[in-house]
Image (cartoon, grey):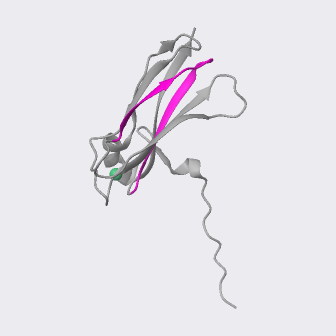
Amino acid sequence: MGLLVKPMETSLGTMIYTYDGAAGEALGKRESHTPKIEAPKSVKSGEVFEVKVKVGPHPNTAEHSIRWIALFLEEDGRAFNPLMLAKSSFAPGYAQPEVVFRIQLQKGGILHAMEYCNLHGLWSGKSPIKTG
Ligand SMILES: [Fe+2]
């Protein structure tokens, strides 16, 4: 009877890199992969505003590129977070991983942006936002 090896189980959350959490080989990738969020620190409840998210400088070829960026809200007081607010996909070699989302919030919280690089995985960045 052969040795039964159970596959290693990992949760998706532990595979999302962050600027401060990166270690080892990922340290050299964090400047080029952590999404940068440009958003107001405070907005009026219900009023539309712009959130710009960009990644890079980063290669943009069929072999290696940023494939998508998604924006989430960790909403204050919400039982199940996050809310996915918007997502944008990029054709390698054609579209730059830079996007402006038009958003309106009823409650503040923390904006989280996540991107996917086909070689270097999932990376997230965040920016707190208040409503008044
Ligand atoms: Fe990459």
Q: From what the image shows, is residue 43 above or below residue 6?
A: above
Q: For the point 51% across and 17% down, which residue is it?
A: 48
55 relative to 88 in the view: left or right: left
Work out which residue is located at the far right of the displayed protein and give it: 79
In the rendered image, which quarter contains the C terminus?
A: top right
3 relative to 119 in the view: left or right: right
In the rendered image, which quarter contains the N terminus?
A: bottom right
Q: Main secondary structure of the magenta part?
A: strand
Residue 47: image quadrant is top right
Q: From what the image shows, is residue 101 above or below residue 97?
A: above
Q: For the point 29% across and 48% down, which residue is it?
A: 94
Q: From what the image shows, is residue 51 above or below residue 117?
A: above
Task: Tally the numbered discs.
Answer: 0
Q: Magenta residues, as a range?
A: 97-118
Pinpoint residue 6: horizontal percent, then vertical percent.
65, 72
Pinpoint residue 80: horizontal percent, then vertical percent.
70, 34
Q: For the point 39% across and 39% down, which residue is it?
A: 34
Pinpoint residue 84: horizontal percent, then vertical percent.
58, 36
Q: From what the image shows, is residue 60 above or below residue 70?
A: below
Q: Does the magenta-highlighted stretch encompass residue 119?
A: no
Pinpoint residue 78: horizontal percent, then vertical percent.
70, 27
Residue 7: image quadrant is bottom right
Q: Nearer the viewer, residue 104 or 120?
A: 104
Q: For the point 54% across and 15% down, which residue is it?
A: 130
Work out which residue is located at the far bottom of the displayed protein and give it: 1
Residue 44: image quadrant is top right
